Amino acid sequence: MSQPSSLPVREFLLTLQDTLCHKLAAADGGHFLEDDWQREAGGGGRSRILRDGGVFEQAGVNFSHVHGAALPASASAHRPELAGRSFTAMGVSLVLHPRNPYVPTSHANVRFFIAEKPGEAPVWWFGGGFDLTPFYGFREDVLHWHRTARDLCRPFGDDVYPRYKAWCDDYFYLKHRAEARGVGGLFFDDLNTPDFDRCFAFTRAVGEGFLSAYMPILERRRDMPWGERERQFQLYRRGRYVEFNLVWDRGTLFGLQSGGRTESILMSMPPLVRWEYDYQPAEGSPESALSRDFLPVRDWLGEAGE
C-alpha cells in the first residue's frame, strides 16, 4: 500500500501549469501574465492570465496550495470526520474563454486534499476532470472530446469512463434551469483507494490529457467566420456559465470560504456576458440546435457505435 505524500503532487501540479500555459500561449500568440499571491492564513499560489489574445478573450491557469489549522465550518459540517484536523489543499485549474463563438469554452482542474490529526491516519483524496461548453455544437468535436476522455480512463478500468462521465453530467447541471452547462466530459472527487500511487496516476492522466482533448477542437474552429449574431448568442450563453459557478460550483464556494484569493477564484468568469429575459432562439436556427441536440445528456460514444 503506497502512502500519501503531497510533495510529488505539488511538483506535478507546478509542471502541469507550466505545460498548459506554454501550449496555450503558443496556440494563441499571446502570453500569460503571472501574479504570485500569499494567503494570510497559510499558503498561496500563482495565477496566470492571458487577456485579449489572438484566440482567447480570457484564459486563466491557476495553481494554488493552501493550508490551515481547521477547515471552514461549512466544509466540516459536510465531512464531520474532518473536524479538528489541519488541512492542505492544492490544485491546478484552468478556464478558457475564446473570442470566436464557434470555439468552445472549456474548464479543467486536478486537485489534492489531505487532512491530518496527530495519532490518526490522514484523510486524503484526489479530484478533478474536464468539461466542454460549446455555443455552437459540432458532433465530430463532441465525439473527439469523449473519445479522448474514454481512452485516458481505459488503463484504470473499463468502468471508469462511464462512471466519471455520468458524474460530470450530474455535476455540471443547472438545476434552476433544468439544463446542462455543456456536453460534459469527466468529473471525479473523493478518489482515495488504498493505492495512493494509482489514484495519483489517474489524476495525472486527466491533467495531462486535457490538451489532447481540447487543442484539435480549437484548431478546427478558430478560423471560422462569425458576426454579431453569433457574438450576441455567445455572450448570452456565457450567462449560464456564470450562473453555475456562482450558484452550484463547490470549488468556488470552498475557495471563498477558506479565505482563498478572490481574484484567482473568480478568474473563471468570462470578461463579457449578457442576460436577456425569456430568450427563445428561433425554431430551426443554429442557436436552437444547442439546446435541442447537444445539451441533453447523451451517450455520445455509444450512439456512435463505439
Image (cartoon, rainbow, N blue to C red):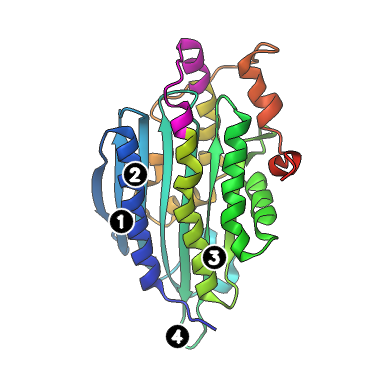
Sequence-first tag of 3 and 1: 1
Residue of label 3: 76
Tell me the tag on residue 23. 2
C-alpha gap between disc 3 and disc 1: 23 Å
Q: Which of 269 and 108 lies nearest the eye of the viewer?
A: 108
Q: Position of residue 240 (x, y in %)?
A: 56, 31
SS under mark 3: helix
Tell me the tag on residue 110. none
Residue shown at 54%/71% (left/top)? 198
SS under mark 4: loop
The amino acid pointed to by label 3 is Ser
Q: Main secondary structure of the magenta part?
A: helix
Quadrant assignment for the N terminus: bottom right
Q: Are the residues at dot 3 and dot 2 in contact (C-beta closer than 8 Å)? A: no
| Mark 3 or 1, closer to the camera | 1
In the figure, 96 relative to 283: above or below? below
Q: Position of residue 144 (x, y in %)?
A: 58, 40
Residue shown at 50%/79% (left/top)? 122
Residue shown at 54%/51% (left/top)? 250
Residue of label 4: 118
Q: Are the residues at dot 2 and dot 4 in contact (C-beta closer than 8 Å)? A: no
| Mark 3 or 4, closer to the camera | 4
| Mark 2 or 4, closer to the camera | 2
Sequence-first tag of 3 and 2: 2
* Residue 223 drawn in magenta: yes
Tell me the tag on residue 45. 1
The amino acid pointed to by label 2 is Lys
| Mark 3 or 2, closer to the camera | 2
For the magenta stretch, what is the residue range? 218-234
SS under mark 2: helix
The amino acid pointed to by label 1 is Gly
